[in-house]
Image: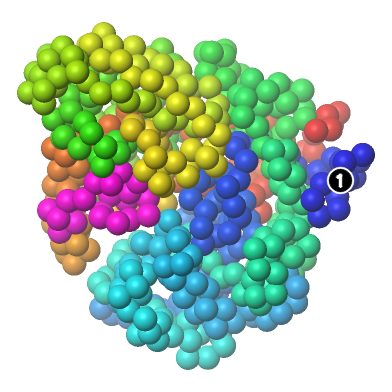
């Protein structure tokens, strides 16, 4: 019988808990991950200074406590007596060296901008500063980490919970090189260790007995299944092979009207938006009139009513509703007549002469293809243009976006912390998650002004001005709809799973209220 990587055979028995994780992870390196399937696993293997409880609130992680200076700029973290999964002590020096690695330009971390709130971190990441000792982080002793920020940052503790700020075991990197992420070699500090990783099948997580809060971890072994088909995911859940699906793309949309009546169907609003982005380095998408025309021509209500059908709302802004104190701009809306006028002004009356172009989308799930096909038809009807469709496997798709190897691309974003900045900061010039080639000194300046603004009301007003520039004027992105989080599980059996506005669900918090009987073996 075939062996799982790491030596776990498929005959080893059923895991305590099995869930659908979606696409095949691109990597499990916490400093490089960008997609939700990767982050979900990485945050089970690696823990940073802070963590989140089931409801998404910040709680102590490797740091058992911290103090914040009166001016809000200096954080002093006190680390608990934690150890790595191989028994090595976990110290502040591990954080210091790991943060240096994440900021190193050679690492190419997509979330390196999360460090930009720290003094001189942005300059080090850009390569203009070579001396890491000038970055605002020091380790006064083995159990203390001191961080100095450029300005008070109300969501900094949220950022510290993100995988990009987690420590990695650098001795393993030095010993194993690129193989350090393989089962049997990966050393973790989180609630789980990597027992096996079978490509296009599953990632197997084993409880880490050396984790500081191991007594709280509910399952000894978790199997995270890699699946592309929502129908397959549902069939596995319905037959008892899978205990949980928590990704809307893995719920069959054609069946959702029926599923919504079932007791195992759970839905809640999340801080997430599904949108399209343009590669503005390619013609004709370098012209904002073309981008705005394409945005104005899309009937978003048609998409949520015909395709997604889980109660999603059409999106005008990139930032979804739910951020305290923030009112997003209304966006461009739906106006085919204005869209046709803009397209004609840009030199393509009635769509004549419009260059060959295509929509890139991830092949994971069926909805991405359905939405792309619907938008293709909408643009044909309203603008007289023809665009192609280009589906790619998840990892290839991510690489195409990052390398600007696309014309228009399907995208989504779920907030990493409860502040509109988590959406808007993505499109600052040079950000790893920008992936449009778009650059605006005016936009960058507004985001910088918001960072410096201490008054929360004025700060939100600046962010709103920035977002209006993004979605109304420049339009390098087209917001399509706001996400609804959908999960399938039996709540009389599974405990610890809560609605989370950030759509984060710590695997370590899950447990059986009542262990299911007659479960299938995947």
Which residues make up the magenta segment? 426-446
In what element is the residue under mark 1? Answer: loop
Q: Quadrant of the N terminus?
A: top right
Residue at position x 58%, y 28% in the image: 250
Tell which residue pokes out farthest to the top in this image.
381
For mark 1, does the 10 Å Cα neighbourhood hold few (<14), some (14 to 19), or many (20 or more) residues? few
Q: Can residue 69 be seen in this snapshot?
A: yes
Q: Main secondary structure of the magenta part?
A: loop
From the image, tell me which residue sits under label 1. Answer: 3
Residue 345 position, x and y percent, is 7, 23
Does the segment drawn in magenta span residue 174?
A: no
Q: Quadrant of the C terminus?
A: top right
- Number of numbered tags placed on the structure image: 1
Residue at position x 77%, y 30% in the image: 241
Residue 55 position, x and y percent, is 51, 49
Residue 62 position, x and y percent, is 57, 71
Q: Nearer the viewer, residue 295 or 391?
A: 391
Q: Nearer the viewer, residue 388 or 120?
A: 388
Up-down relation of residue 206 to residue 288 (above or below): below
Does the segment drawn in magenta span residue 437?
A: yes
Q: Nearer the viewer, residue 270 or 26?
A: 26
Rendering quarter of residue 491: top right
């Amino acid at each position: 019988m075939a062996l799982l990587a790491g030596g776990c055979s498929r005959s080893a028995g059923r895991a305590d808990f099995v869930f659908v994780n979606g696409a095949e992870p691109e990597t499990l390196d916490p400093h490089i991950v960008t997609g939700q399937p990767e982050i979900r696993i990485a945050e089970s293997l690696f823990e940073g200074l802070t963590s989140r409880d089931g409801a998404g609130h910040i709680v102590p992680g490797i740091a058992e406590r911290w103090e914040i200076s009166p001016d809000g700029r200096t954080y002093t973290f006190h680390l608990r007596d934690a150890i790595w999964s191989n028994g090595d002590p976990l110290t502040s020096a591990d954080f210091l060296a790991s943060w240096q690695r994440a900021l190193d330009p050679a690492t190419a971390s997509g979330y390196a901008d999360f460090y930009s709130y720290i003094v001189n971190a942005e300059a080090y990441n850009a390569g203009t500063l070579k001396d890491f000792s000038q970055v605002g982080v020091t380790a006064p002793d083995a159990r203390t980490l001191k961080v100095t920020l450029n300005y008070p940052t109300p969501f900094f503790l949220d950022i510290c919970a993100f995988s990009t700020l987690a420590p990695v075991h650098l001795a393993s990197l030095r010993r194993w090189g690129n193989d350090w992420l393989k089962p049997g070699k990966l050393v973790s500090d989180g609630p789980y260790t990597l027992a096996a990783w079978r490509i296009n099948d599953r990632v197997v997580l084993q409880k880490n007995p050396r984790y500081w809060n191991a007594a709280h971890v509910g399952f000894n072994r978790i199997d995270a299944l890699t699946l592309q088909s929502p129908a397959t995911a549902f069939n596995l859940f319905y037959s008892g092979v899978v205990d949980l699906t928590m990704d809307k793309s893995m719920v069959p949309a054609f069946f959702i009207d029926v599923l919504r009546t079932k007791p195992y169907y759970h839905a809640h609003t999340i801080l997430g938006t599904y949108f399209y982005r343009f590669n503005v380095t390619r013609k004709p998408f370098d012209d904002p009139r073309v981008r705005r025309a394409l945005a104005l021509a899309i009937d978003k209500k048609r998409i949520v009513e015909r395709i997604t059908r889980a109660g999603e709302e059409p999106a005008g802004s990139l930032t979804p509703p739910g951020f305290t104190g923030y009112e997003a701009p209304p966006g461009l809306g739906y106006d085919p007549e204005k869209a046709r006028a803009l397209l004609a002004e840009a030199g393509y009356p009635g769509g004549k002469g419009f260059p060959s172009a295509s929509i890139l989308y991830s092949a994971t799930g069926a909805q991405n293809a359905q939405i792309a096909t619907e938008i293709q038809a909408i643009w044909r009807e309203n603008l007289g243009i023809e665009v192609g469709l280009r589906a790619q496997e998840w990892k290839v798709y991510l690489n195409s976006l990052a390398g600007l190897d696309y014309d228009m691309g399907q995208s989504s974003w779920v907030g990493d912390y409860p502040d509109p900045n988590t959406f808007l900061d993505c499109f600052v010039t040079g950000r790893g998650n920008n992936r449009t080639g778009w650059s605006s000194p005016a936009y960058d300046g507004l985001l910088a002004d918001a960072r410096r603004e201490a008054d929360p009301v004025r700060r939100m007003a600046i962010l709103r001005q920035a977002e209006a520039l993004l979605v109304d004027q420049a339009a390098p992105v087209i917001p399509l709809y706001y996400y609804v989080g959908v999960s399938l599980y039996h709540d009389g059996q599974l405990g610890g799973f809560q609605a989370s506005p950030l759509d984060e669900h710590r695997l370590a918090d899950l447990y059986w209220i009542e262990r299911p009987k007659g479960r299938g073996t995947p």
